[in-house]
Image (cartoon, rainbow, N blue to C red):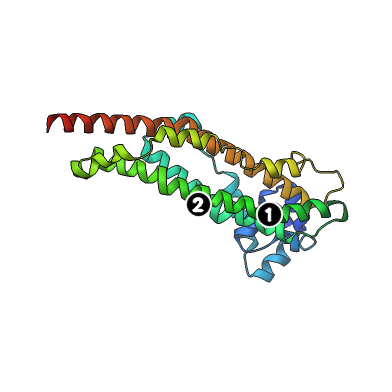
Amino acid sequence: MHSSKNKHRKSIAELVTENHVLAEVLHYFGISFFQHEHHSLEEVCAQYKVSPFQVIAELEEWAGRVEPTKDELFLHPIGVLVGYLKKKHRHFIRQALPFLTSMVEGIEMEKSQKSLITDLRLMFPLFVDDFIHHIHEEEDTLFERIAYLHEIEGGAIPLVEAIKVFELPSIQKMAEEHDAHDDEMIGIRKLTNDYEISGEASVSMRVLFIELQKLEKELMIHAKIENDLLFPKAVELEREVLRRLRLQIKNN
């Protein structure tokens, strides 16, 4: 309790330097850490009518979160994998991207970083738009196709309708196109010189670069799960459904 009380009295800048995850937790509570770096957690929480104990508890809960490994995901059927990827999509759209956007748009520009932040303010919204479009396109095409194949497999679609699946582009073709668009953050990585930050940079700039790099790593893992697990399972599902349809057509 004493340790927790000490945290309440430390400045936001100190606490975020100790654990940058606090910056995202504060954003979850509607607080932009970069606007309150010199205030204590206690002062900021009082201003926003949030319990500092609740903020610390949330921080500890976030620290305890563990993502499933690729090997663990491999053991699950494709429906579970799609559910996991949809959940990650919601995380990107509702949490990670708004948090980063608030920093890119809101942090105070240091003289030495003015040109970089100006360029980032032009580039980052374009990346966000492209990425969200990619998510919606994937869910509307690949995820919908997987759901449709499951319906055919379960006999929920009449044969006269099910055979139309032969006219659709193959999932293998989708996989090849997806693989060609994996490096979505290459422009931002080049702009930030591989997220290299100078020793004199502010806490806000450090957190921004750490979070950009963290997002890129998450997107690379996400793409790898899709390319190495989802698409192979989807291709196999499609192959099996088409095989059964051919048999049904032959026997009719």
Res. 243 image quadrant = top left
In the foreground, 246 or 155: 246
Label 2: how many residues lie within 10 Å, few (<14), some (14-19) or many (20+)? few
**251 relative position to 114: left or right:** left
Disc 1 vs disc 2: which is toward the camera? Answer: 2
Amino acid at pointer 2: Arg
Quarter of the figure with the C terminus: top left
Residue at image position (54%, 52%) is 132
In the picture of the structure, the residue carrying the numbered disc 2 is 90
In the foreground, 62 or 196: 196
In the picture of the structure, the residue carrying the numbered disc 1 is 23
The image shows residue 173 at horizontal and vertical percentages of 43, 34
Residue at image position (40%, 35%) is 171
The image shows residue 1 at horizontal and vertical percentages of 66, 54
Q: Is residue 75 visible?
A: no
Label 1: how many residues lie within 10 Å, few (<14), some (14-19) or many (20+)? many
Vertical arrangement, residue 224 with respect to residue 122, above or below: above
Q: Of the residues under marks 1 and 2, which one precedes in the sequence?
A: 1
Amino acid at pointer 1: Ala
In the foreground, 48 or 214: 214
Q: Is residue 93 visible?
A: yes
Element under disc 1: helix
Vertical arrangement, residue 98 with respect to residue 175, above or below: below
Q: Check whether the beta carbons of the residues at disc 1 and disc 2 lie within 8 A of each other.
A: no
Residue at image position (73%, 61%) is 106
Residue extending farthest to the front is 167
